[in-house]
Each structure stands twice: as structure tokens, then as C-alpha cells.
Amino acid sequence: MRAIPTYDLYGEKNGDSPGFWLHCETIPSRSSLHHWEIRLHRHEQFFQILYIAAGSGDAVFGDVVEAIAAPAVITIPPLSRHGFRFSKDIDGYVFTVLTKRLKTMPGDHSQFGAWLGLPRLTALPPDHADSRYIADTLHRLAAEAAARRTGPADLWEAYLTSALRLTARLSAAGQGDEDGGTTENDRRLNRLTGLIHQHFRSHKPVSFYATALGISPTHLNRIVKQLTGSSTQTLINGKLIDEAQRELLFTQIPVQEIGFRLGFIDPAYFSRFFLARAGLSPRQWRRRQGRED
């Protein structure tokens, strides 16, 4: 089986830049450089939203191809295999968001979280009030990002949350709970993500998740490696770090209390665990984001 590349941002390293969490560009600006085709790939830490304002094409979700007709919104959670073929008259925006900045995470057990956990193509009926609001909100978000106004985080987050929740509502009304034809291993990965979200605070071993999925730990690690390039334990540790960063970013809870909430009995071990994977101590990371402990 041909390996699917994992890109930070179409091969770029923007996610490593201090303060980066949202990138916006027009669809033609990137796709025209690749002859209007983005080959099958995945992102490890990014959630993507494509707003299709004009044009047509195909969205490729793993082994499934869905026709694109404007206006529409395409949502791509991290680790999902995806690619695109666009017509030359395509127009719209691509928003790339650090997943930990989403108010609700893909893989949780709410209806919205479950919707975020799978790639979706959602049509925007022109005569629907929510469609018009979604389009206007994404246009505003693109304008804010282009203007690079100071202190926009709260406004950007509000735009994102509103657009995503309304899109999820339209998607549920139009598609129900279809899974887009994902493969068995893709479904196992999505199920694993949900289980990790449910149990990560308990620090369950890989064998626990393998048993829940009805396969051996070796088979589970093989699937995860094939689809993500990482081990199952790396996904578990990554979830702990993502949640720690969300708490550090969105709350004023003391670092020690955050560690306790994440199942770390020893505050010093929590700090060492965070430092080894984030490159900074929890307090240093919070200060870099402009929040004091």
C-alpha cells in the first residue's frame, strides 16, 4: 500500500511558529501551483475548513470521491486522508486551525464532536438562512486574518465556532450519520480517537484500547502507524498534551490543578511529561501564549 504523506501545512512548518494557530489563504493561490490538484495527504495536528464560493471539483476522502458544487463547506479533521481536484474557476478559502484551539475537539461524544471527527462535504443551499450566515461569517474570518488585526483571538474563535456549529446542523439535516464510505481501518482509527477522548485521563495502556476494538495491540499499532505515522501511545500522549494546552490557554486554573485533572498525581512528573513533548514547561508555555499562571 502506498504511504500517505503527513504534512504540517501542505509541507510547511507554520505550526511551529510562536502564536500561530490559524492560517487562511484562497483556494486558487495554492491549488493553481499544483495544476488544480492536491494529492492525497493528511495533517497530524490541523483541522481544515474549505469554503467553496464558486467552481466545482472532487473531494477525495480516502477511497471515496465526492463531487463538489458551490457553495459548500468541506471540513477535514486531523489524520483524515484527503485530496482535491478543482476546476480552474474554483474560488473560496482554506482555513487551517490548530486542533487544540477548537472549543470542541474531534472525537468527543457530543453530537458536534462526533461530526468534527469525520471529513464532511456540506452543501450550502443558497435560499437557506444558515447558509448565508455561514458564508458571511467565513468571509469575515478571512478578512480578519488578512488584515492581521491585533488581539483578534476571541473574535476569530467566535467566527470559527459559529460557522462550524451551523455547518454541522446543515450536515446533520442533509446527510444524517453517514460516514462518507471510510475504510474499516479508518473507522477503527476514528473509534480509537473517541476512546482516547473518553479514557485519556485514566492513563489506560495500549492493550486496553486494543481490547475495546477487538484486535491485538500489535495489530492496533500497525493500523495507527499505517494511517498516522505514529504509535498508539504517541496518540494517547498527544491527547494529554492537547488537553493540557487547552486548559492552559482557555482557563486560569493553576498548573498543578491541571495536572491533577489530567490524572497526574505527581505535579513534578506532569511538568516533565509536558516539557518532554511540548518543549516548554506548562508555565513557560502559558506565558508564551500571553496567559499568566
Image: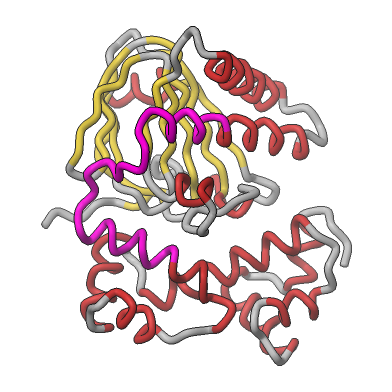
Return the x and y of residue 123 as percentages of the image width and height.
Answer: 39, 21
- Residue at 57 percent of width and 22 percent of height: 134
- The quadrant in which residue 44 appears is bottom left
Judged from this view, the residue extending furthest toward the left is 1
Judged from this view, the residue extending furthest toward the right is 292
Residue 217 in sight: yes
Return the x and y of residue 249 as percentages of the image width and height.
Answer: 75, 57
Q: Is residue 168 magenta?
A: yes
Residue situated in front as seen by the camera: 261 or 171: 171
Total labels: the figure holds 0
SS majority, magenta: helix
- Residue at 69 percent of width and 38 percent of height: 157
**Colouring method of the image:** secondary structure
- The quadrant in which residue 21 appears is top right
Return the x and y of residue 45 as percentages of the image width and height.
Answer: 49, 54
Quadrant into which the C terminus falls: bottom right
214 versus 71 height, above or below: below
189 versus 206 height, above or below: above
Residue situated in front as seen by the camera: 193 or 225: 193
Return the x and y of residue 189 as percentages of the image width and height.
Answer: 32, 62
Quadrant into which the N terminus falls: bottom left
Lateral position of residue 263 relative to residue 94, left or right: right
Residue 29 in sight: no
- The quadrant in which residue 60 appears is top left
- Residue at 58 percent of width and 36 percent of height: 165
Q: Does the magenta stretch include residue 282?
A: no
- Residue at 28 percent of width and 36 percent of height: 83
Lateral position of residue 65 relative to residue 159, left or right: left
The magenta region covers 166-194
